[in-house]
Amino acid sequence: MKQYRVLTVIWLWIAALMTLHAQSYAYPDPSSFHTSSVYFVTLQNAQGENITDAYADTWAVIGAFVGDDLRGVSETRIVDPTGKQKVFFIRVWGDENDPAVVTFRMRDNRLGLEYVIGTRAFGRGDEVTYGLPSNPIVLTLAPVENIRLSTTNITVLQGGTTGIRPELIPADHSELLTELRTEYVSTDTNIFTVDNFGIITGKTHGEAQVVVNMYYGELLCFSTRAYVSVLSEKVSVTGLRNDMPSTDIEVKEGEKFSLQYTVLPENATNRQVITQVGDTKVLEKIEIDEFTPATYKALKEGKTTITVTTVDGGFQLVYNVTVVENPDLVVHVRAIVVESETVSAYVDDMVYINYDVLPANATDKSVDITIDRTDVLQAVAGGYKALAVGEAHVTLTSKDNPDVSVVVTVTVKAVPPVTLAFASTDIVLSKLHDVRLALTASDADKVLANRVEIVFDQHPNSGWGTVAMAVKADATGLSWDARARYVGNYVARLRYNGVLQSSTCNIHVPAEYQFGPGWNWLSFHTVSAAQKNIIPLTKELMDRLTVGPDNGVMEIRSQNALLYYDPEVGYFGDIEALSPTEGTYKLKAMYDDGEEEESDLEPARMVITTSYEQLVNSSTLSLPTMVHGYSWATYPHELDHSVQALAPYLSLRAYDEDKIISRTGFAEFDGEDWITSTGFRFEAGQGYLYYSSSDGGEKINWGPVTLQPDGAPARRQAVSRQTAFAYNPSAYPDCMAVVARLDGVADAADYEVGAYVGGECRGSGRCASNGLMYVTVSGKPGEQVYFRLCHLPSGQYVETDMQPLGFRGSMGSHHHPVVIVPSVTGISDFAAASSLHVALQAGLVVVNGAKAEPFITIVDAQGKQVATHRGSRMVLPRLVPGVYMVQVSDGVSRTVIKVKK
């Protein structure tokens, strides 16, 4: 169970929900049951080989039956986290009165065939998971691959009968539930007839074929055929006659031909012959089927024989075949062209010789390459390595035409001596942007850019690598852009032509924390060794963060203290410094450039930069201790990590229903592992709230500081979140973590839930790996939160009938989720946000705030329009009792209100 909970977070869902029609399984109604069991399944054949990939397309469906009732259908195929195999995912509904066994059937919708592929234990009234994505249960499917007859050569006497019956192969196939209809067809009823039971009756001496087809309904599933000979009496073969001009045959390369001969007498009972090619490298025999004469293809110049032998009597014909050159097929090489016949290089350079063999359609374009001075130039994979000063000649000779060759002269020179130095001996690098590193040279014109290297100190913790994560040079090799990866003090050195230079540069990497408009959750992972406070809130720092009354940091909150900005008196409050020991800080930033705020590509950002003197990692400090309820937690790592990477450590001190909440998402501990919606990960510098269901008193185990990176992007970029509900998670300081279950729909995975306060969207969520929805709702205490749905395949929106939730720290858990039920009115269209104000007053619809003359529509519970009006005031028409929607649009904004009549 534990492995399932973690690994399913990274499923790659690769197939859409299958809506199966007449031939397949109808999805059961989950509203009839209160529990379900989950099965992760792979298929094997009778030999024990995994065949899941071959059946993981949309035509293969597994149904789960409890008794005679269909209770589950393989809705999706997933790839297990190791990437080794595909897995079927089946959710089977039931209750405590069911038998404890579930039977699995597989429907092959290509052929309409249905098999029983196994039985397994069933959890009945318990929520049970069988198998894991990485260790699924195995069901055996031995599918019917075709049909066959006991013989493909049938002999029957004139007036006699014989019977045939097709056999399904393999014979040990899984129990086939589908009934197949067999059809028998004679290709020549004058020679023989065949009835619906496969009885063949010989009519006249001759040969024809019997075709056997198997159908499911009108769908042809399998077909085979046999050769039928009707004999009056046996006539022996007396000879074999050549019907060609000669038994000596000459043919060009690439051409095809057939032999012409006659078995004598022509009414011989067995006229079958055997042909054999002497040299299959010269001549290839091509057999279409046993009823069609063979053809022969000339492969290359040479001589061979074809021997034809009658089965009856052993009479032979021998054909002598000569294959000659075909000038239309062989194109000889006429020239080899190189880019340049003289090449200059420096010692240790790689030399590449690009050449073309002409004409472009030459049959054999391969060349032989020789080097006269292997002490100067050595052939290596893909090119040539310059070893020493001197001159070497590379000769390229055509294998097809040895008279065609070209010589390339390679002159290897010594690398000119150059002394390099850093233009500055102290540089501050950034983790957020590139910094230019300038070099000087004793003779800049002689610098070989590809021989210049900047060598950074290794990070002291484990084997993470160098401090720089992105370094690139310009064409001169004297100007470099570098971006840091780790906080601290380092040394950079220069290497030219493999030789370390004497110049060094002190590299300082401060801890930088960037934040954008609105509320930001930050935590700090580095501190000065001389003081526990990472960032003293000095006047100089606050002046830097306060550009104007509407541009800067307006508020800072920790779990235990506050700091505010007042345009007249400046900052006031009891936060004097920012420290890892205080956990998460909530900072509210404001900007006066609205256009910049709304930019998706380059959002406005401020940056807090620490001092870089004597920095140490904060994992050596005493981080905040968890309490019962919410703790504002420090995330101590310099690198981003996935939930999967940290779960083994976080689980050591976690309790059932613990939560870790970020600004836009959260993860919940189910007693064994951490479950979250797709895309949630821990990011360096971001703040988190830890909800503990225990008495607290323990520190969060975030894992060792030496934890290796697990795929965090080298350069973090702004990512547009794909959602059906638009909202700004930074607009409010707090959030509520809601674990919800969507009831009353066939497939909750097709829906996204939106959380609303008034007419404003405050958050959204979709199904996680365990089928629950994890929704982080931005807001503040005292607000009422209600939910709406979007059906993602159709893009239609759906109201819900649940009562609003009061805003609080969290609602629901995986044991007791909040239940969301779609409205039963059938109305599915509403606005996600609107600036219009619509009210009902004394039988009137009154619209305020419209930017144009509004258009008002009243819709009944089935979505049918019952009245329309253009204008700001509409008299309500006479309506029968029921539920109605008033939709208003002024061409810019749109709003909808629900009215009960």
Image (spheres, rainbow, N blue to C red):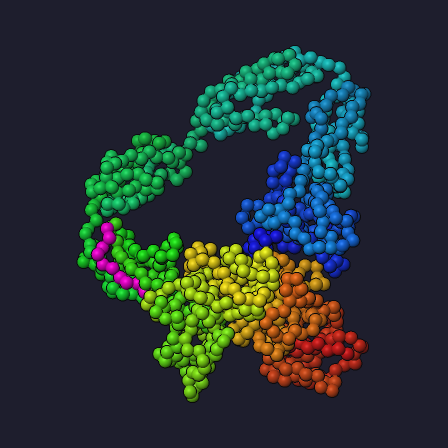
- Classify 243 as above or below 218: above
Q: Nearer the viewer, residue 660 or 732?
A: 660
Height in image: 898 above or below 384?
A: below
Q: Main SS of the magenta segment?
A: strand
The residue at 64%/16% (across/down) is: 311
Q: Position of residue 313 (x, y in %)?
A: 64, 12
Kindly identify the residue that appears in the image at 66 percent across and 46 percent down. 60
Q: Is residue 379 left or right of residue 215?
A: left
Residue occupying the far bottom of the picture: 568
Q: Could you tell me if residue 197 is visible in this image?
A: yes
Quarter in which the C terminus is drawn: bottom right
Is 13 located above or below residue 110 in the figure?
below
Is 141 covered by the magenta stretch? no
Where 848 sits versus 39, above or below? below
In the image, what residue occupies the spot 61% across and 68% down?
738
Tell which of 852 and 150 is nearer to you: 150
Q: Is residue 589 left or right of residue 45?
A: left
Asked if residue 72 lies left or right of residue 496, the reply is right
- Viewer can see residue 444: no
In the image, what residue occupies the spot 69% across and 16% down? 268
Residue range of the region highlighted in magenta in the rendering: 499-508
Q: Position of residue 344 (x, y in %)?
A: 24, 46
Residue 77 located left or right of residue 305: right
Quarter of the rendering containing residue 461: bottom left
Q: Position of residue 593 (x, y in %)?
A: 44, 78
